[in-house]
Every structure is written in C-alpha cells, then in structure tokens.
Amino acid sequence: MKKVLVFLFIILLVTVALSKVTITMWHAMSGSRLPAVEAIVNGFNATHPDIEVVAQFTGSYAETLTKAIAAYRAGDQPHIVQVYEVGLQTMLDSGAIVPVYELAGPDFDWGDVIGPILEYYSVNGKLYSMPFNSSTAILYYNKDIFEAAGLDPNKPPTTFNELYEYGKKIVESGAAPGGISFGWPAWVFEQMHAYHAQFYANNENGRAAKATEVYFNKDFGVDVMAEWMKWAQDKVLVYGGREYSANQAFLSGQVAMLIQSTSSVGSIESKANFNVGTTFLPRIEGYPRGNSVIGGATLWVMKGHSKEEYEAIWEFLQYVMKTEVTMQWHKSTGYFPATNSAVKALLDEGWFAQHPNHLTAFLQILSGTRVPEAQGVRLGNFVAIRDVVDSAIEEALQYNGTNYWKEAKKILDNAAEKANTILWEYTMIYGK
C-alpha cells in the first residue's frame, strides 16, 4: 500500500510539473534592484503553483529592447519584456505587442493607477503596458557638505541661479571639489523641458501625430545648455556619465548635489555616510511651470503565445499591481508605487513620515501643473535620439570659452539636425 501511495504521489508531482505554465520575463534590473525583482517573482511563484515566472536579466534598457524586438522577428520572443519610457513609440509600432488593456477583465480598476503614469503609457485612453518601475528625477544633496560650506542644510536651491551660487560657494570653500553631477543627462534635459512647460518635439511631443522635428534647439533648450556649460567651466557641474555613474561621485563626496532618478533613493540612503536630503528640481526663472515627467519602465506583453499563457501573464501582471507588492517594490527601490491604493497605504502606516526622501518625487509630480508638454515624449527611435543628445551634452560641457549661448546653439542645432534625420527615417518606415 505504501508503494502505491508513493507511486501516486510521484504521478501527481509529474502531472503538476507537466501542466505548469512557464512565463519568461526579460528585464534590465541589476545591482540593488535585482533582489527586489526576484522577491516579486518568487512571491508570485510561491502562491501560484500552476504558473512559473522565469525572470532573466538581459542587459541594459537599450539592450533589452533591441533583443526583444529581434527575438520576436526570430520567433523566439519572451512573454513579458521590461522596456524603458523612450521605447514607447518603438513598441507601439513594432507589431510585436499585445496591449495590456486587451488582457484585462472588466473588473480591473485602471482608475487606481497613478495619473501621470496612466497618461504616459495610454493611447486614446487605453493602457498599452503595465506600470512597473516608474520614476522621475529629483535633486539629492549632501547636508553635511552644505553645513561645511556655510549653507543652510534645510534650504536647498530652488532655482538655477541659486544652484550655481551654492555650487560656487561649496567649491570655493573646499567643502567638495564639485557642486553637482547628473545621472542620465539627456533625460534631465528632457525633464527640464517638461518641468518648464516646453515641448521637446512637434505634434505635441509626438502624441498628436508622429513627431517629425525636435524642438530642443530652440531658445529654452539653449538657455539650459548654456547654463550647464557655465557651471561646468566654473567646476560647479561635474560630468558623471550617461546613467548611474554619477551616484558614486555623490556618495564619495566629490560633489555636493546630484540630479538623479528617484529610483536611487533606496541605494543612496543605504550607502551614504552623510545626511541625505532631497528636493524638487531647480527652475529657470521666467518660464512657465510644467511638471516633472515619468521615467523608468513598464512591462510589455509580446505577441505569439497561447491563450493559456496569456491568462497566466495576466495573473502575474495583476499580482505586480497588488497593493502590498507595489508597496514593497517602492520601499526596496524608491520607484513610484503604481497605484493610489498603495500610496494611501504607505501614508496610513507612516512610511513617508519616516522616510521623507521617498516622498519628494511624489510631491513634485503631483504638485506640478498637468500640461501637455509634461505628458511624455513619443519619438520614433528615441533611443538613438537620446544618444545624440547625450553626445551633444558631452561636447558642450567640454567648452572652454565665454560665449556659452552661441556655442550651445551651434551644438544643439547640429544635434537637432541628426535627430530630425532619425525621425524622417522612422516615418519613412512606419508612416506619419
């Protein structure tokens, strides 16, 4: 009898294993974010014995996007892929995706999704990818260095002029070798446009129709770049690379301030041996108020899978959006919790009162002016265009002269010409 029971148990285990639906998810989360992703996947798998989500790190955001499109064309695509915000138009035109609204049942509450996130990834009022790791840029600052430089640690700069003056005082006092550095400089440049209610491209940033011309070489963009060039020449601004390298310059005390994604809040606070402050992005006086814009990435569902697999995918996506799951994701990383329910729960338990640096990005984006300029930019092959802008910023920050505005205009005009060629080539393939 015992042998029969053992045999039946083995048969049961084999049957369960054979009937299990396996879902692959490609993502770009590394470093301190990787354990947070694994915690979500492990939590789902533990509560869904008939489904197994296999998460695979596939390189940087750009690499993951490129690999996913290539895999679809080869017929070997994952079920889910994490794509950053600049891949939005590419994914919409790829022919490789199933919009998430098509998978949802009638009872799913889309209205619970944080407004700016919902707006960014929606087309004609329908959400195309599932919110996951949304962020925006904020200003981090070292309160200890501020005090050493004779600055009030509770009064961070609010304008470009104040930031420049604070930076000069920090450098001249010897409190730090540099004033500020940026993570993702081209993204910060985009943020500045949204924050000051300036379009980055025509056709309402590519949302009314496909963009065919960039606007970043107009007066506002030149004003921003000219300021940065002045800061760099006076050692106030220290170039920190294209992604997260600037974080180390901030953590090591090489600079007193950092503009970076709110997704770095958790790692910066855990690694810093000084008092970390956060505040809103600085403004250029004389321009209207807009809003910071969503960054980070969402989860896209790929075409070419079975009905059973799509049912399993939807189970996982709903799990990702559960209040307790998105709360923990936010606590572990600093990314926005994706729903209003999660925000309320965090407020109710006193999380933000105990961790005010996690609240800064929320206050900034929710207190900004909801204008079309800040809804988000959709550009064809935006990945290549951001690369062009990064190169332009790198060139500008090497300038050694006094005519900042004229040189900034020249550099941005050259970059705009390259970007417009990329847009033209894109519309030749996908139409206007």
Image (spheres, helix red, strand yellow):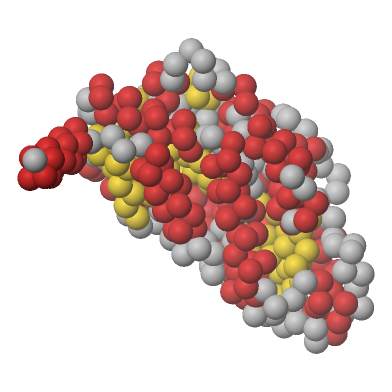
Q: Position of residue 189 (x, y in %)?
A: 63, 51
Measured from the top left, where is residue 74 in percent x and y? Answer: 16, 39
- The residue closer to the viewer here, 96 or 278, is 278
Residue 160 visible at all: yes
Q: Nearer the viewer, residue 13 or 337?
A: 13
362 on left or right of 113: right
Residue 411 seen by the camera = no
The structure residue drawn at horizontal position 25% and vertical position 24%, both measured from the top left corner, is 308
Q: Residue furthest top?
A: 106
Residue at image position (77%, 48%) is 350
Residue shown at the point (57%, 21%) measured from the top left: 109
Q: Is residue 191 left or right of residue 317?
A: right
Vertical order, 237 against 355 (above or below): below
Quarter location, residue 172: bottom right
> Residue visible at 42% across and 25% down?
100
Furthest toward the front, the residue is: 1
Residue 81 placement: quadrant: top left
